Image (cartoon, rainbow, N blue to C red):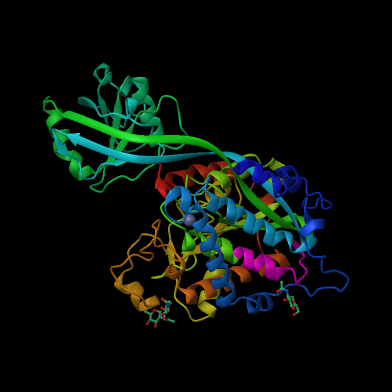
């Protein structure tokens, strides 16, 4: 059903965007779109003029609409959500698409369908020597234990970091592999454990803290896999090293499904198509809640700016993206960049990521993107945000540029990137309270990935202010790339060498650790 409906709202492929066919119109523009505003020459966009169009009341009205859309999922999920595959997400896509369609031919609109994996964990438990392991978390996208039943086995210590076949002793067969975190992704460890015949796997941390990870792209060899804190693992490691036995019982009831979902892309028909400023937010939420801050705040800021921009002309092309499957591991943005032909890659001068702009206990956070380890231009973008906060007499903090949102695929593929955010599950410090107000010792967003991420979970001051900054970023580059490094300066060889450095700094792929 979902797919048929998607197809109905006008299916064009990436080819339309990539090929930049300016005569390509949304299928239903004639029927439902307003007549394009044309004739009078529109003024060239300016930062101040575009910022002036932004108001928290318009943003809030959109947030209320989005919450109603999230409630469409209640039948199936018993609560509002916009997770991929739900009616709430389908409704979100329709809302974004229709809103853009009503802007006439200012934008070339396209959908980019792609297959996405989506995991659901119903129940999970790990016993070690009959004690419940308190810090054991099943990895995202883990398969269930065999027949979705508990399995018993000996805990078998794997050598090194368990990144090679030879690290797995033959005694792993029929037992539970106990693997140290590090060096290679969790998915690789689970796969090697499966190939060695393990009935389940546990990845224990090299730090005292728990591991909330993802196995990433499913493999037929993956086995049910938990993460475990280093602190809780320590006594069992000691026992095993003294050749004592540890009995384990693992139980995971879970499913991994593959579903089709879609990115939505809107590109100005005006403006130099060989020099695009691109920006994105994600249209989906987690299953646990409606995702009004994460990332309603970013995706609605983009929708509002896309609407307001139509009263202006642009020199450079502006390309907006609403990614799907971000919460399952940056699936939509990864897919987009993966299938982008090299010539099209080069036309994207930079990518700006806007994910969570209105956290209730916010800080003004700027991704610490640096030309040293990121494609050249990333640092100039970082400084554009910094300069704006400074010019407004506001404080800001730098946060790691470590793969937690949709910029990741762009950076790995040589496209300069950056963005701003207001904070997720991290805890606000006393220093930050002096800088931004709010409460110390409390997360930036107490409702991060929870049911209470609703319309009350927005700080409107932060949302309006950051949306103005997003407008500033759009207007600046829509006018001119003067002083911004050319893509040609940052050839593929450099991009590749850098992506090696970048990978060393990256532990996340989306909200979950993957390594
Ligand atoms: C564009 O400007 C006109 C005239 O000021 C205004 O009436 C209209 O609402 C604006 N368009 C949008 C999309 O806000
Ligand atoms: C910026 O932070 C300092 C403390 O580091 C604080 O004194 C100042 O009031 C803050 N500025 C604003 C605008 O909040
Ligand atoms: C938003 O943040 C500002 C500045 O810290 C604060 O004055 C205001 O009360 C907050 N609004 C809400 C709704 O929490
Ligand atoms: Zn997000």
Q: Residue at x 20, y 41 (%)?
A: 133
Asked if one can make out residue 169 in the rendered structure from this viewpoint, the answer is yes
Residue 461 percent coordinates (x, y): 48, 77
Instruction: State the image quarter where residue 168 is shown.
Output: top left
Query: Residue pushed farthest front?
Result: 75
Which of the image's four quarters has the C terminus?
Answer: top left
Instruction: Say whether residue 193 is left or right of residue 306.
Output: left
Nearest to the observer: residue 90 or residue 381 = 90
Left or right of 248 on screen, residue 476: right
Image quadrant of residue 253?
top left
Q: Is residue 330 magenta?
A: no
Quadrant where ligand 3 appears: bottom left
Point 30% across, 28% down: residue: 200
Which residue, as the protein is rendered here, is positioned at the far right? 39
Position of residue 156 measured from the top left corner of the image (x, y, whole percent): 22, 25
Residue range of the region highlighted in magenta in the rendering: 302-316
Q: Nearer the viewer, residue 88 or 244?
A: 88
When the figure is inspected, residue 154 is found, relative to residue 420, above or below; the finding is above
The answer to whether any part of residue 368 appears in the image is no
* Residue that appears at 43% across and 44% down: 504
The N terminus - image quarter? top right
Residue at 77% x, 59% y is 32
Where residue 87 sits: x, y (%)? 54, 50
In percent of width and height, residue 84 lies at 52, 47
Number of marks = 0
Q: Quadrant of residue 136?
A: top left
């Amino acid at each position: 059903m979902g797919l048929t409906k998607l197809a109905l709202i006008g299916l064009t492929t990436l080819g339309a965007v990539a090929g930049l066919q300016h005569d390509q119109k949304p299928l239903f523009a004639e029927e439902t779109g307003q007549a394009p505003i044309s004739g009078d020459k529109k003024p060239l966009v300016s930062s101040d003029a575009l910022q002036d169009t932004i108001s928290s009341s318009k943003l809030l009205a959109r947030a209320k609409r989005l919450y109603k859309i999230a409630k469409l999922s209640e039948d199936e999920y018993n609560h509002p959500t916009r997770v991929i595959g739900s009616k709430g997400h389908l409704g979100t896509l329709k809302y974004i698409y229709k809103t853009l369609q009503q802007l006439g031919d200012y934008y070339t609109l396209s959908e980019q369908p792609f297959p996405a994996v989506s995991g659901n964990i119903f129940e999970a438990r790990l016993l070690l020597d009959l004690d419940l392991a308190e810090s054991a978390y099943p990895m995202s996208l883990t398969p269930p234990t065999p027949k979705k039943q508990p399995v018993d086995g000996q805990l078998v210590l794997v050598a090194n970091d368990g990144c090679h076949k030879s690290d797995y002793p033959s005694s792993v067969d029929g037992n539970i592999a106990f693997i140290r975190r590090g060096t290679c992704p969790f998915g690789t460890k689970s796969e090697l454990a499966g190939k060695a015949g393990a009935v389940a796997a546990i990845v224990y941390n090299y730090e005292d803290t728990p591991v909330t990870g993802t196995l990433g792209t499913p493999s037929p060899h993956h086995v049910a896999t938990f993460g475990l804190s280093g602190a809780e693992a320590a006594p069992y490691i000691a026992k095993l090293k003294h050749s004592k036995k540890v009995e384990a019982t693992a139980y995971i009831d879970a499913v991994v499904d593959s579903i089709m979902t879609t990115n939505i892309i809107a590109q100005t028909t005006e403006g130099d198509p060989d020099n695009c400023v691109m920006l994105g937010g994600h249209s989906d939420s987690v299953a646990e809640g409606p995702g009004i801050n994460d990332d309603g705040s970013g995706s609605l800021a983009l929708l509002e700016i896309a609407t307001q921009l139509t009263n202006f002309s642009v020199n450079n092309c502006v390309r907006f993206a609403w990614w799907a499957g971000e919460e399952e591991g940056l699936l939509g943005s990864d897919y987009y960049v993966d299938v982008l032909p090299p010539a099209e890659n080069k036309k994207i001068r930079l990518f700006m990521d806007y994910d969570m702009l209105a956290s209730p206990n916010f800080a003004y956070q700027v991704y610490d993107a640096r030309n040293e380890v990121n494609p050249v231009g990333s640092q100039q973008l970082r400084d554009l945000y910094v300069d704006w906060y400074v010019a407004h007499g506001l404080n800001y903090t730098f946060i790691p540029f470590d793969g937690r949102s949709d910029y990741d695929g762009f950076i790995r593929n040589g496209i300069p990137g950056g963005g701003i955010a207001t904070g997720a599950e991290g805890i606000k410090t006393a220093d930050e309270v002096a800088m931004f107000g709010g409460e110390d010792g409390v997360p930036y967003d107490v409702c991060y990935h929870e049911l209470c991420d609703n319309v009350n979970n927005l700080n409107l001051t932060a949302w309006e202010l950051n949306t103005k900054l997003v407008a500033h970023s759009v207007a600046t580059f829509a006018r001119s790339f003067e002083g911004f490094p050319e893509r040609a300066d940052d050839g593929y060889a450099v991009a590749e060498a850098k992506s090696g450095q970048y990978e060393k700094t990256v532990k996340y792929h989306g909200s979950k650790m993957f390594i």
